[in-house]
Image (spheres, grey):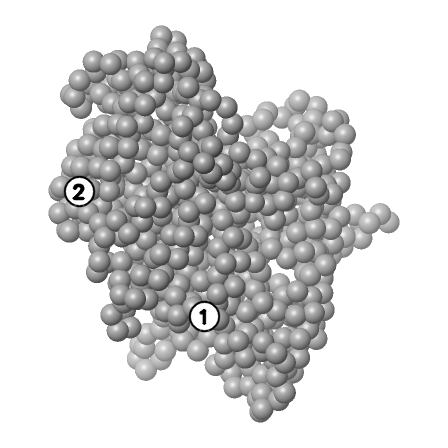
Amino acid sequence: MTWKDKLAEDMPADWAREIDVFEAQIELKKQGKLTDQLFAETRLRRGAYGQRYDNGQRHDGVAQQTLTYPRSLTKGPETLFDAPGMLRIKIPFGGLNPVQMEVLADLAEEYSDEICHITTRQDVQLHYVHIDDTPDIMRRLAAVGITTREACGNSVRNVTACPLAGVCRDEGFDVTPYSQAMMTFMLGHPDTMDFGRKFKIAFSGCAQHACGLVNMHDLGLLATTRTSDGVEQRGFVAYVGGGLGAVPHQAKILSDFVTEEEILPVMQAIARVFARLGEKRNRARARIKFLIKSLGIDEFKRLVEEERAKLPHDPRWTAYIKDVPAWRETPLKSGAALNGAAQPDGFTRWSETNVYAQRQAGYSVVTVTLPLGDLTSEQMRKLADVARKYVGESVRTTVDQNIVLRWVRDADLPALYRDLGAIGLGAADANTIVDVTSCPGTDTCKLGIASSRGLAGELRNRMAERSYDLDAAVRGLHIKISGCFNSCGQHHVADLGFYGVSRQVGGYQVPHFQVVLGGQWSHNAASYGLPIGAIPSKNIPAVVDRLTSQFVRERQSDETFQAYCQRIGKKALKTMLDEFSKVPAHDVDASFYSDWGDPREFTTGDMGTGECAGEVVSLAEFALADAELEVFEAQLALEAGDFAKADHIAYGAMVHAAKALLKSQMPDIGDDAARIVAEFKTRFHDTELFHDRFAKGMVAGYLFRRHEEGAGTLTKESVHQLVEEASLFVEAGHACQLRMAQQKAPVTGAAAQVVSLDLG
């Protein structure tokens, strides 16, 4: 019997067959018998992504040449791809046990770069994995109950849930068995095979905390109960159409009470409506939030109810419910109080931020802080040993990119703290301003513009050095960073959010971050912030210092940071940060022209193409800067509640940004908006001169849609989205102008070298 046969004995039969099929598809691709497009969707549905790997950076920001490559980077050219990729591994509701942790550690060590990365959706990712190795990795995972199926692609992604479910002091009830049932039911379900884009589901046990983030998901289910004829009934408030991405959307309430018997058929009905009516051709408009915006929540609800009524009965809808009352985690040890036990150095501070008292007396949840979501394979393996010693199988990942140990006996907390410290995982400051969240950014993501992880690491180090001296109101803030506007780092819902952009200064490209303020992390990500201006990457730490120090000096009573930002207004906030927007000349301070964690210049060479082209570039940049200012003025109008004015200014900003680019080809384009939009479509959109590779037409479509549809009915939400879209359109204009300059060729006539923007 081979090792594969032995593993197959421990795998679900359907999982084993799927992995065999995937391995065969890899071979067919090598033989040229499978198209690139078909294989791309196939591997994505199996969790296998391409990744950036030749940019000189790795997880810790150290130049690649100083590191030992995993074996995937040393394979010969006969393999399927020249470059390794990333494998995303689904961890439903974040639940792990020590055996699974050991397998993850082994795989990271044998096939990856010895790093297990925890994502903001409770997954685990392995980077620098070769496609040829993925079937074997999948088999080893499947043998311990883990799948990568539908971790990526146009599918139902990992079903997330509050990591405190079942032990939270504020929850309605434990959502764990419901999230598990949802994952099992939707995995590979035929009604999900024709989605235009991904679909994300989250469960939360309470409304006030951010553990589940139901407001920013395609489907969010919030635990609630009601009493009927004296009997308590479990159910969920169902939210639909939430999401971050380039332009965030707040979820709408589909129903204020979906019974536990109905959550699976309702999800199936939603899936059918989404598959039938959702956008398929334009991926940028293919998420369900756009369908709901187009139809309206009332019509969408009607369609879902109509679909639900037609569904043939499926016994799986309710089969799991009989087992819900029996769902219990069994503590490894009997509960016992701390009772004045000797405490090692640092324990008090660590327990303040990393220990949560469960609703069950004598037990606590301990957060294991993972800087940037990373732990080494050796740390994962030793953490599995720690879990066995103190909690058994009660381990979960979190949306904050950490790991929690549940059912820790309070009497064991000092010993656990010592054991975590011994493996380098005893850091305090979980869920504070020190605990910075970041997407992979330019380390491994093909869409990354700026080094989100490099900046996050810098901010984390600086905040950790000051953590003992930070004001309590500042310590409770959240910093979240994305490498581009797509919000994988969740910058829209942070107190202090940042996303990567670029600017051209004196012929050089300079990494910048847009500063996003006004987001709300609590209450399941209740509101989204807006960008107020781009700041050079190297000045972001100073921006954080200025904002937090001003907040401490000027806050009123127990005012939150979000309330403080609303009270003083965006104009005052922008004025506060204006001094940090300046970039010194290259010969004065060259450090501004490289990114955090990367010693190389962000870009090199003189971007000018001679006197004439230099003038065009200068005029275009000037006009784009004016358009950027208009976007900010639109924000001020939105803040003042003047929706019509905000809409008008935001639309005008996009028109003026389009005109700025057009003047390179049509100096006398004039001011007629209809002509500008038409010419922009012909000369920049249709020729793909203004083009983002990964979501064709997305950014340009913001202008076209607003121009064609007009203002329409204006609400705070719709205008908020338009202002966000205008900001992204102007950013795309900056990138387009820069790409044209980098071509070092005239931009007239066949202007027409295609320029591809790395905007996601």
Q: Nearer the viewer, residue 597 or 662?
A: 597
- The answer to whether residue 648 is left or right of residue 555 is left
Q: Is residue 164 above or below residue 511?
A: below
Three-letter residue code for mark 1: Asp
Residue 607 pos. (x, y %): 44, 22
Q: Disc 2 designates what residue?
A: 646
Give the label on residue 469, or none: 1
Q: Residue furthest top?
A: 749
- The answer to whether residue 512 is left or right of residue 153 is left
- The answer to whether residue 687 is left or right of residue 716 is right
Three-letter residue code for mark 2: Ala
Select label 1 or label 2 by which is in front.
Answer: 1
Residue 546 pos. (x, y %): 35, 56
Q: Residue furthest bottom?
A: 339
Q: Looking at the image, which residue is at 36% across and 78% down?
A: 232
Q: Looking at the image, which residue is at 64% across and 48% down?
A: 126
Asked if residue 220 shows in the view, the reply is no
Q: Residue furthest front?
A: 588
Give the label on residue 32, or none: none
